[in-house]
Amino acid sequence: MPSLIPQENLASALRGAYPELGSIAAAGGECVYLVGGAVRDLLLGRERGDIDVAVVGDAAELAAALGAETVAAHERFGTVKVVLDGHEVDLATARTETYERPGALPTVAPAGSIEADLARRDFTLNAIALPLADPGIVVDPHGGRADLEAGLLRILRPTSFIDDPTRAIRAARYAARFGFALVPETEELLRATDLTTISAERREAELLRLGAEPSAAEGLELLAGWGLLQTGEHWEALAAALSELLDESPWAGEVDPAQVWIAAARGPHGDVHGLANAHPTQPSQAASLARHHSPTELILARALGAEWLDDYMGVWRDTSLEIDGDDLVAAGIPTGPALGRGLDAALRAKLDGETAGRDDELAVALAAAREG
C-alpha cells in the first residue's frame, strides 16, 4: 500500500515542490487552495505535476492581482491559466456543476466553499485540498486520504459515470498508473457506463490521455475487461511487442505513443496486416511499400513481425540523392513526368547499392527519363 507524506510534513513538502505558490498564497489569503492531482501526487511523494488552484471567489481577480502573464481564460468555467516563475498554474473559481442530461457538458455556478467544489469532482483521491494559507491542514470531506493509503479508487457519487462517462476512461488511467483497485460499488457503476452519450471527440481525447501514460497497455486492458473497449484479436501480441519497440531505436521519438496504443487496441486495419505480411527482397521494394504509410501504421506492422521496417526507419527512409530535377533539366530532360521517372529510378538504384556517387545517379536517372 502507498506510504503517504505525514500531515506534519505537508507544508515543507509543498514549499519544496511548488515554491511559486507562495505568491498566490500572499495574494489570495484564506481563499485559495491547491486541489486535485497536485495534492494527490504530493501526498504520494511523486514528482510535481500540473498545478490546479481553486479560488473561493473570483479567479480572474486573483490573476489580475498577481500581475502574471495570462496564457488562457475560459469565462464559462471561471478558469484562468497564468505563468508564475516559469510554470503554468491553473486558477479556477470554486464551482458547483449540474448536468442537463447524461454526458452533457456541465452547467457551472460559483461555490461558496471549497467543500462544495470538492463534491463535484470525480474520485475521492482527487477531492482533497490544501489551503495555501495553512498547507498543514488537509481538507478531505470524502475520505480521499484513506483511499490513497488503501490503494483504492472510489467514485464520489452514484451518478458520476452517468454525468460524465469520460470518468470511466479516467478510472482506467488512474488504476493502471497507481496500481489501485476499484471498490466494488465503483466497479459495478463503471461497468454500466454508456460512453456513447459523449461526443466522439471527447471520447477520443480521453483515450489519448490514457494512451500517453507509461502504463497505457494496462489501462487499455482494464477498459476491455470492464466491457468498455473492444480490443482487436492481435491485442496481446501487439501490446507485448509495442512495449519494447516504443523505447527502442529507430522507433523511439518517431511515433506518437498515444496514437499507437489506441490504434493497437482497436486492432490494425487491413493495410497494416498487408504490410506485416510483405517480404521485400530489395531495399527499394521495402521503401516503396512503406513510404506511403503513417508512422503509427509502420510500427504496428513491425510489431506484427515486419522486422525489415527497422531498416526502413533507420536507414532507407532517409536515403536521398545527390542529384535533383535541375540536373536532369540541364541535361536536356523537359519538365514533366520524365523528371519524376528518372529521379525515382535513381533512388531505387541507390537504395539497392547499384550506384556509387553523383555521376552514377545521373546516368541512371537520364536513362530512365529517356525511356518514355
Image: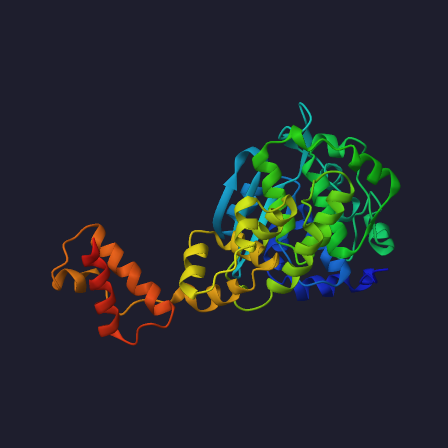
Closest to the observer: 54 or 201?
Answer: 201
Report the residue that reaches farthest toward the top: 100
The colour scheme applied to this rendered structure is rainbow
Counting from the top left corner in percent of width and height, residue 206 is at 63, 43
Quadrant of the frame with the N terminus: bottom right
Can you tell which quarter of the image residue 39 is in?
Answer: bottom right
Q: Residue furthest front?
A: 371
The location of residue 191, given as percent across then percent down, is: 79, 36
Asked if one can make out residue 132 in the rendered structure from this viewpoint, the answer is: no
Q: Residue 342: x and y, percent?
A: 24, 59
Q: Position of residue 94 (x, y in %)?
A: 66, 39
Residue at (64% x, 54% y) in the render: 25
Towards the viewer: 352 or 247: 352
Quarter-wise, where is residue 267 in the image?
top right
In the rendered image, the vertical position of residue 205 relative to residue 366, given as above or below: above
**Residue name at image x 78 percent, y 41 percent:** 226
Judge left or right: residue 87 versus residue 138. left
- Residue 88 to residue 323: above or below: above
Residue at 15% in and 58% down: 333
- What is the count of numbered marks? 0
Q: Give the answer, above or below, for where 277 lies relative to 249.
A: above
| Residue in the foreground of this view, choosing between 263 and 303 | 303
In the image, taking residue 366 as reference, residue 2 lies left or right, namely right
152 lies above or below 22: above
| Residue 341 makes an appearance in the image | yes
Locate residue 162 relative to residue 71 in the image: left or right: right
